[in-house]
Amino acid sequence: MTFKNRKLYLGGVSAESLAKKYNTPLYVYETDKIRERFSDFKDNIKYKKLRIHFAVKANNNVEILKFLRKLGSNAETVSIGAIKLAFEAGFKPNQIIHTCNGMTDDEIKFLIKNKITTNIDSLTQLEKWGKFSPGSKVSLRLNQDIGAGSHVYLVTGGEDSKFGIHISHIDEAERIAKNYRLKIIGLQQHVGTDAFLEPSVFIRVAKALMETAHKFDGLEFLDFGGAFGIPYRPGEARLNPKALGKEFVPVIEDFNRSYGKEVAVILEPGRYLVAESGTLLAKVTDVKKNSVRTFVSVDTGMNHLIRPALYNAYHEIVNANGNSKKSVVSITGNICESADFFAKDRKLPQFKIGDVAAILDTGAYGYSMSSNYNSRPRPAEILVSGGKAKLIREREKI
């Protein structure tokens, strides 16, 4: 993302021209930003058994998945649909790790049949897995009463979380595994999302999983989940990947020495890899005032980007047409819901009808969480790089 004469360019293409050619609303993704963020992990965490598994739920466009696979990424899935998307993108079963709660018998059988490494989420699932596939290998998702996240709904560990086998039930999990001759080869812990902006916080959480790992023999990997955040707000601290690698690698190497073998390390970034690559372009359709506020209406809404309504999430918004004069406005969507805001009482560049508003950092949990609410079609998606644009998902039609 760059500005030329105050006008927004994405991947070397002006946002205005993209909006004109492909219409709005429009999701635009910059490949250079995805490559840069993937390199943050690959180039700075110098551990030879590091495996990066992109969280498919963050962005499920097949072309994005193909691009990440070519960069060297594996996939992390949470549904059979996500596994089939990963297959379509070219990932092999041994490049996928699956984590899901509330699995049906058919889902468990599908995972076993396709030889997908699975982080078992409950004692019930473990029992069923043992009955369906005695003597096989499994991993356990643990809840160690550690939770973190930028919103209460983004916390996936702790006493209020539905995820994982509680640490107090480890002995029971081992009993079930022994009864069915299951070999526990991995442990997974995911404490939340958008939680880690400081390496020290991740290290503390990682050490907790390593401590628990000493209770198991024969582990092949430790899966530390995702939760790597991005700076959504101006001036917010950014994760330092070089510092992360410098702090983390000695810790895992110390664990290997005490454990007596070298384990693989799995990380499951989703947001971190793709969020900053994405921009949602929307056309201004109305500007109106009441006694105290100015409302700028755009031709998209919470059906296309639900994060502000669901999580009270902050997304920076710019005028792609380059107006630099600012005023306090609220950016509203076109959905019949009072929660349909992208910004409230925020000082932003002034907008007029026909301008293109660019909602930034929408590459993760944007389109993948979208819906047809209010019977509105979903937008097209575009991949941009080197001044060229490629349509990677057509606009839905009524």
Image: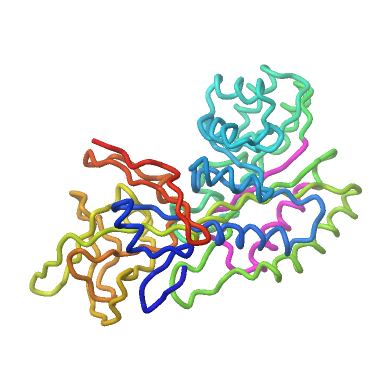
**Residue at horizontal 67%, vertical 30%?**
116
**Residue 391 shown in magenta:** no
- Which residue is more in the foreground, 37 or 107? 37
289 sits left or right of 317 in the view: left
- With respect to residue 195, does 79 lie above or below? above
Quadrant housing the C terminus = top left
**Residue at horizontal 72%, vertical 48%?**
51
**Residue at horizontal 67%, vertical 67%?**
241
**Residue 210 shown in magenta:** yes
Residue 222 location (% of width, % of height): 74, 47
Please identify the quarter of the rendering in which residue 136 is found: top right
249 sits left or right of 62 in the view: right
24 sits left or right of 168 in the view: left
Going by the picture, which residue comes out furthest to the top? Answer: 132
Going by the picture, which residue comes out furthest to the bottom? Answer: 325
The image's colour scheme reads rainbow
Residue 392 location (% of width, % of height): 45, 44
Residue 166 location (% of width, % of height): 62, 42
- Which residue is more in the foreground, 72 or 8? 8
**Span shown in magenta:** 185-213
**Residue at horizontal 23%, vertical 68%?**
330
Residue 76 location (% of width, % of height): 61, 42
Q: How many marks?
A: 0
- Which residue is more in the foreground, 87 or 53? 87
